[in-house]
Amino acid sequence: MEQEKLKEAAVSAEKEYQERIVSKQVEKIKALVKATLEEIDLLKKEKEEIESKISILKGDLENLKNGRIDLIKQRQDVDELAKKVSVIKIVEVKRNNNPYYPYYPWNRPYYIYNQKDYVDPTITWCSTDVDNDNVVITGKLTQTYSAGAYNVNGHVINFR
């Protein structure tokens, strides 16, 4: 009878040992799965941020192609991310320190700069000076001349 009790105790101890091993294995697997899911979630958030930035830049290109500089300016005024992400810096042309509003908004004159190269000058209405970076541009000009083939990072992109 004592041998049976010892046998049962040995079987019980072995069973507990196996359960602890399985429990540790399950914990390890769950920790790995959780870490993987956290990494996926982090990458999805980064992807969403990148996609929103790409969307803003594509919107800028579409608006340039359609001659709607006013929509780019409006988006930058409303959305701080668009102002930060956009490559284009738009400054309104003023006459006597008052905004100039033509009949058609796409014909409104703007100064357009690359955001990286922009230095805030005091700009007033002036004639176009080709030696100066302050060239007046309207939506009609961007609509007409933005399309073309561009060599970007070693490959040609046809923008139409």
Image (spheres, rainbow, N blue to C red):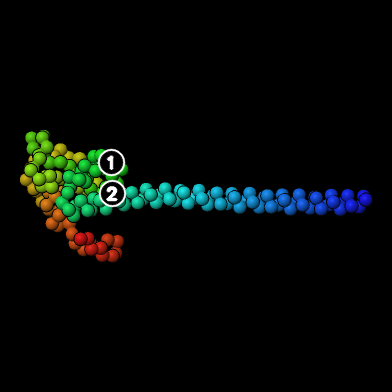
Q: Amino acid at mark 2?
A: Ile
The residue sitting at the bottom extreme is 155
- Give the left or right position of residue 15, taking residue 111 as reference: right
110 on left or right of 41: left
Q: Is residue 83 visible?
A: yes
Q: Secondary structure at mark 2?
A: helix
Q: Residue at x 24, y 42 (%)?
A: 76
Q: Is residue 78 above or below residue 156?
A: above
- Which numbered dot is residue 79? 1
Read off the residue under disc 2.
56
Q: Identify the image quadrant of the C terminus.
A: bottom left
Q: Nearer the viewer, residue 56 or 109?
A: 56
- The 10 Å Cα crowd at callout 1, few under 14, some 14 to 19, many 20 or more, is few
| Tag 1 near tag 2, CB within 8 Å | yes
Question: Which of 27/57 is in front?
Answer: 27
Name the residue at 79% across, 53% down: 14
* Residue 148 x, y percent position in the rendering: 19, 62
Identity of the residue drawn at 88% across and 49% down: 5
| Residue extending farthest top | 97
Residue 137 in view of the camera: no
Q: Secondary structure at mark 1?
A: loop
**Quadrant in which residue 81 is drawn:** top left
Inspect the image, locate mark 1, and give the three-letter code of the amino acid beneath it. Asp
Q: Position of residue 19 (x, y in %)?
A: 72, 51
Report whether 52 appears left or right of 75. right
First-in-chain label (1 vs 2) = 2
